[in-house]
Image (cartoon, rainbow, N blue to C red):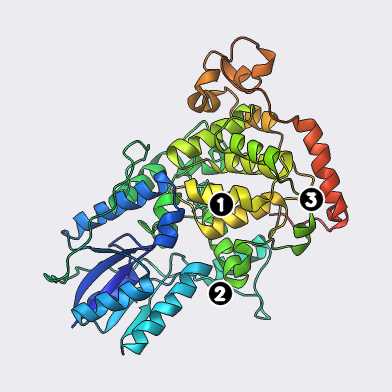
Amino acid sequence: MSSIWWIRRDLRLQDNPALGQACAEGSVLPVFVFDPVIWGAAGPVRRAYLVNSLRSLNEAMGGHLIVRSGNPVDVIPDVAAHVSAQTVHIGADFGPYGSARDLRVETALTNQARSLIRTGSPYAVAPGRVTKSDGTPYRVYTPFFRAWSEHGWRSPAADVTPDWLAAPSLISEPLPEVSEAVHLPEVGEAAAHWRWHEFAQTALASYDEGRNRPDLAGTSMLSAHLRWGEIHPRTLLADLNDSPAHVVFRKEIAWREFYADVLHHAPATARTWLNPKFEHMEYESGPQADEQFDAWTQGRTGYPFVDAGMRQLLNEGWMHNRVRMVTASFLVKDLHLPWQRGAAWFMKMLRDGDIASNQHGWQWVAGSGTDASPYFRIFNPVTQGLRFDPDGDYVRRYVPELGALPGKSAHEPWDHPGLAVDYPGRIVDHAQERDESLRRYSAIGEDKAPLPKSD
Ligand SMILES: Cc1cc2nc3c(=O)[nH]c(=O)nc-3n(C[C@H](O)[C@H](O)[C@H](O)COP(=O)(O)OP(=O)(O)OC[C@H]3O[C@@H](n4cnc5c(N)ncnc54)[C@H](O)[C@@H]3O)c2cc1C
């Protein structure tokens, strides 16, 4: 008998329970569907990442991948009928769009007397599994982390040797053309494992110290590999011990799991404020707001740390967590724009763009999310730069106009007129906008709300 392995967020052959289930039934047809809804929303770096990763996976499968484009609700049942597959195997998707789509595909398959079988997920512990003793979901990270750790997770799944189905009458569409101009690291399953081993040997032992510095290689840079399932978090967790640095790294993996859990229980928060009172805050709109938004997207706000991050995002589709927090804070608290606007730009541009981590990372910064940053924590883009990029190396790397400014002076080009040629002036005055932001937060009563429990 043959079955279909429908690939979505698990672009890997190792430690893949859904593929394992498919193999247990006989020969396997690997299928990827380019859904115009998802593909249409992706920017050039994200597209290039996906296509390169699929190319690498296809090579590892001896060229057996079948690529289709269209609505999976039509395409998957069509392909299943073509090869007479009784079952379609997937790793479960817990995002609002993906889970609703899977239900529709399941109905279409059931109508043809076929079945959709979900095995595993992109998480060590599937969203919804860890709840409080009364069965309600956690809204605060620290108790979630405790319960998640106690729950535990499976060991990596055993390796399989798939018997790929050759279906000569089924011709794959070519992979879409993508921009050659984007800067990507190595992608694919082998690259993900290589990166994990390299990080484990060089920076993991000092991760608790080094993880806040965007000018240094102190973090794993595994987020896109995890996003596309080129490596599973189980594989990482299995290698960790209880040293302080490893515990901090495990806690970061748990943030990803926490946000997936929060979104699973409150799917509308992909678009709306988790704390509904933030809907009534005063936000900017109109031509000036649009102009400032554009300056932010293009890395031309006049604040070097913000601009370096936004230009890194444009060029590489990635940003360090510290810089994500500072650039997001600038959009929400200096430009007074709703977090959704910034989050949509990040989702389009990030190669690791993940609906749960992104939307809830943004809501944390905006103060409307779980365990949110308190309303008065307004990142100062200059002092953040001086603190976390003390020699200015990070900003000079991404903002060439600041190349003539030595050391930390790159963070304050306005103090060195004539050296920062062609670099824009500041589009807003941070001190003024900070006060304005506090006023808007007070107007919705945030200054009277109890402070969130911190980690
Ligand atoms: C506004 C904003 C938007 C974000 N958008 C995304 C996104 O779309 N996709 C995404 O994967 N992460 C997102 N993050 C979280 C975090 O910035 C990235 O996961 C991290 O920078 C990736 O770099 P790394 O792999 O080197 O992380 P490391 O520091 O090496 O951490 C290891 C892994 O833990 C997870 N992780 C670490 N920090 C977080 C966090 N705060 N929240 C959730 N997971 C975390 C990631 O999977 C990461 O790869 C966002 C954070 C903010 C503040």
Question: Marks 2 and 1: in contact by CB < 8 Å?
Answer: no
- Tell me the residue at 61%/66% (across/down): 262
Q: Secondary structure at mark 2?
A: loop
Q: Secondary structure at mark 1?
A: helix
Real-space Cα separation, disc 1 to disc 3, in angstroms: 19 Å
The residue sitting at the left extreme is 168
- Tell me the residue at 11%/69% (across/down): 168
Horizontal arrangement in the rendering, residue 108 relative to residue 396 (left or right): left
Quadrant holding the C terminus? bottom right
Real-space Cα separation, disc 1 to disc 2, in angstroms: 26 Å
- Tell me the residue at 79%/43% (across/down): 437
Which circle, 2 or 3, is nearer the viewer?
A: 3
Q: Kindly identify the amino acid type of the residue bearing the numbered disc 1.
A: Ala
Real-space Cα separation, disc 2 to disc 3, in angstroms: 34 Å
Q: Position of residue 69 (x, y in %)?
A: 31, 63
Q: Which mark is residue 453?
A: none
Q: Secondary structure at mark 3?
A: loop
Q: Position of residue 236 (x, y in %)?
A: 42, 56
Q: Does the rendering let one see residue 78?
A: yes
Q: Position of residue 391 (x, y in %)?
A: 57, 22
- Tell me the residue at 75%/29% (across/down): 429
State the residue position of label 2. Answer: 128
Q: Which mark is residue 344?
A: 1
Badge 3: residue crowd in 10 Å (few <14, some 14–19, many ≥20): some
State the residue position of label 3. Answer: 282
User: Would you identify the image quadrant in which residue 87 lies?
Assistant: bottom left
Number of numbered discs: 3
Q: Nearer the viewer, residue 93 or 39?
A: 39
